[in-house]
Image: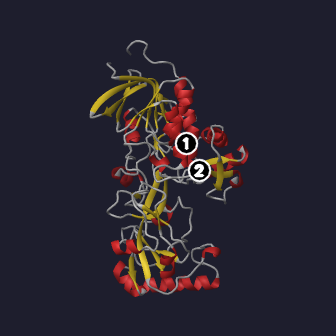
Amino acid sequence: MKWDEETEVLIIGFGGAGAVAAVTAHDSGAKVLIVEKMEKGGGSTNISKGGFLSLKDFAGGFRYLENLCYRVSRGVEPEMIQIYAEECLKNREWLESRGVRTHVYGGASFPQLSGEDSVEKRMITGPNSEDENAFWNFLRSRVESRNITVWYRSPAKALLTDSQGAVIGAVIQKEGKEKAVQARRGIILTCGGFEFDEWMKMNYLKGYPYYSLGTPGNTGDGIRMAQQVGADLWHMSGVSTLLGFKAPEFEAAFMIRPPSYRYIFVDQQGKRFASEFADIHAYNFLVDFFDPHSLRYPRIPCFLIFDEATRQTGPIGVTAIGYNRGRYAWSKDNGEEIRRGWILADDTLAGLAQKTGLDRTFLEKTVDRYKQSCQRGEDAEFHRPQDKLASLGPGPYYAVKLWPCLINTQGGPRRNAKARVLYPDGRPIPRLYSAGELGSLYGLLYQGAGNLGECLAFGRIAGREAAKEGLWGEKEG
């Protein structure tokens, strides 16, 4: 076969996992080429908060991750969890030994699970800008300081294999032309999930539609390429999802987080259906209920209802996180969003119900019942935390449609503890690796900061393992 370009380790996708894998493979002595379909790197990593998973000790951290992964079923091998826990123990040191400081900003997403006190979420201490968070700035700069070649606007189209099924290269579209790039040691897929692939979302996720806060570059490319060479898939229904707002003028959705507790969620009738305070990454579980009688999802969309005091407290939209960062600044009093029609307003709940299509009687009774719960200091219906109970005050009143909005997806090609992509029978596909959210170990439950923890952990593993592969094809295979 005639090759247009040659490298030793080819990395497809320049986000957090790709950067860590590239640095590790390079430092292990391999020649590295990164290809990225977008005009710049960063992917989901750069539009996240920039937090990564760290553990205080192995025993407790392993126990927590095991409980998390095995909460409903045992779809992850114990060895995989063990390796992830061991590598998460090294995440802080790996970063700080390279010249940055980190700090704790949170802990276990599910404190009811054993081992939770061993889990911490950390961030790199430093400024975030509209262009880059501190975490991505650090990783990008480490790639650039090593003079590792990055091809931008160069999507991968297909993986190439030899007669034995070993992955030996890829077809890369660069400057409008398809180039056959040989990878003499291995290929690492780090090209993200399928947040912007409608077919995959319709077929793999429960509930529809799902929008995304993330990068439009995540269209499931790595999943399809891996399938074409025989890869098994796992965790395709696993997601990290909050409730957000999708404006037709913007490609990605907005995170919605009111600045006070004077708000509730209601369904399409106007009835409250859950505590408004689940873990931020697990809001899909609140709304993906399908009603077999009406044959619809009565909570997709649902509605955020809030009062005048909340409107005046500050912006309900968060633009510091997500693809819209730097593309839109939410107004401080939410006035611009009211003018745009994103937020509906009326002096009375009855008028708001008419404008939203909600049932007036249900909405008024819901707000009154919630007010009584606040007065009692107990949410007997849905167990909203006592310190977050705050009834709606005088009008005007406001409503925003809320949709399940993906922070990212977890599904993709199944990998093992050495980051090797697997056939359905569990055998590794020769010379093919993956890292990051593409084929994450997270399934039903997702731990906040866990994906960047995986970018560090399995990025290092994939980079080391691929760099150790023997050179393929001293003569044409």
Image quadrant where one finds the C terminus: top left
Where 395 falls versus 117 (above or below)?
below
Q: Position of residue 461 (x, y in %)?
A: 57, 33
Q: Position of residue 405 (x, y in %)?
A: 43, 60
Image quadrant in which you'd find residue 370: bottom right
Q: In the image, what residue type sits under mark 1?
A: Phe
Answer few, some or many: residues within 10 Å of disc 2's Cα (few below 14, many 20 plus, some between 14 and 19): some
Q: Nearer the viewer, residue 52 or 127?
A: 127
Res. 259 in view? yes
Residues at badges 1 and 2 in contact (C-beta under 8 Å)? yes
Where 461 falls versus 38 (above or below)?
above
Is residue 442 left or right of 101 when viewed as pictured?
A: left
Where 373 falls versus 292 (above or below)?
below
Q: Position of residue 101 (x, y in %)?
A: 65, 46
Q: Nearer the viewer, residue 253 or 175?
A: 175
Answer few, some or many: residues within 10 Å of disc 1's Cα (few below 14, many 20 plus, some between 14 and 19): some
Q: Which residue is mark 2?
A: 126
Res. 423 in view? no
> In the drawing, what numbered circle is on residue 405?
none
Image quadrant in which you'd find residue 383: bottom right
The scheme the figure's colours follow is secondary structure
**Cα distance between the residues tagged 1 and 2:** 10 Å
Is residue 123 left or right of 163 when viewed as pictured?
A: right
Q: Which residue is mark 1?
A: 138
Q: Seen from this angle, which residue lies furthest left?
A: 176
Residue drawn at x 58%, y 53% as measured from the top left: 447
Residue drawn at x 62%, y 37% as measured from the top left: 98
Is residue 74 left or right of 439 when viewed as pictured?
A: right
Q: Position of residue 246 (x, y in %)?
A: 38, 63
